[in-house]
Structures are given as structure tokens and as C-alpha cells.
Image (cartoon, helix red, strand yellow):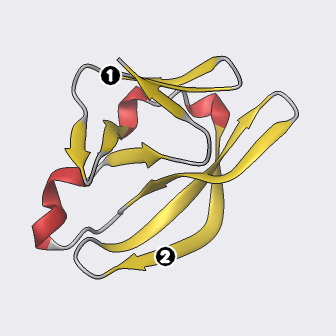
Amino acid sequence: MRAIWKNTVIAESDDTVVVEGNHYFPAESLRHEYFRVSDHHSLCPWKGTASYYDVVVGDEVNANAAWYYPEPKDAAAQIRGHVAFWRGVEVLD
């Protein structure tokens, strides 16, 4: 699987975890030069508190376009150490 934004591959892995239709990529599969820590957080009742990254390609910023659960609840333990995408980031195989 590949995560692509602005014609740039920002993550690539053969070992994603699918939860609620979203592919969660292992953190080590991210091309970290395209990610910037965001101060945004959200709460999922069964997964826990999500943290976010902005995706940055060149001068373009896609705010909060990647999310992860640093301390997922037990029901979502399989996504610990994984990152998912939205806001126009294409996930293709």
C-alpha cells in the first residue's frame, strides 16, 4: 500500500492494518521528511485519543491529514505504532 499526496509517496508498506476502512501504516514506513507534528487531538470512544501530523510537500501543507493513537485502548491495540490518512491523501495498492 502507498499513501500519496501532491503526487508524492509519503508512506509505503506491505503490512498495513485496516480498521473501519482505513489503512494504518507502520510508523517506520512513513517518509518522515513530509510530516510535521500537529497540536490537534481528537477522541474516539473505543480507540482512545488520537494525535495528528500535518503532511507537508514543498510549500503545501495538509493540516492534520495523518493521525495515530499513541496509547490506544485495548480494543484497538493492533494500531499502536501505526498512522492513517485522510483529507485528500490517496491510499492505493
Say which mark, if any, is on residue 42: 2
Residue 67 vertical placement versus 39 (above, below): above
Q: Residue at x 11, y 71 (%)?
A: 74
Instruction: Count neighbours of disc 1 (C-alpha within 10 A) and say few if under 14, some if 14 to 19, many if 20 or more.
Output: some
User: Which image quadrant for residue 58?
Assistant: top right
Horizontally, residue 29 falls left or right of residue 55, namely: left
**Quadrant location, the C terminus:** top left
Residue 30 in percent (x, y) is at 47, 31
Residue 12 in percent (x, y) is at 41, 21
Q: Residue at x 17, y 63 (%)?
A: 76
Marks 1 and 2: CB-CB under 8 Å? no
Q: Residue at x 49, y 65 (%)?
A: 51
Secondary structure under tag 1 reads: loop
Q: 23 and 35: which one is in front?
A: 23
**Quadrant location, the N terminus:** top left
Horizontally, residue 10 falls left or right of residue 93, namely: right
Residue 70 vertical placement versus 83 (above, below): below
User: Which image quadrant for residue 48?
Assistant: bottom left
Residue at mark 1 to residue at mark 2: CA–CA distance: 25 Å
Residue that carries the numbered disc 1 in the rendered image: 13
Residue 90 vertical placement versus 14 (above, below): below
Residue 47 in percent (x, y) is at 26, 71
Q: Residue at x 32, y 39 (%)?
A: 23
Q: 60 and 72: which one is in front?
A: 60
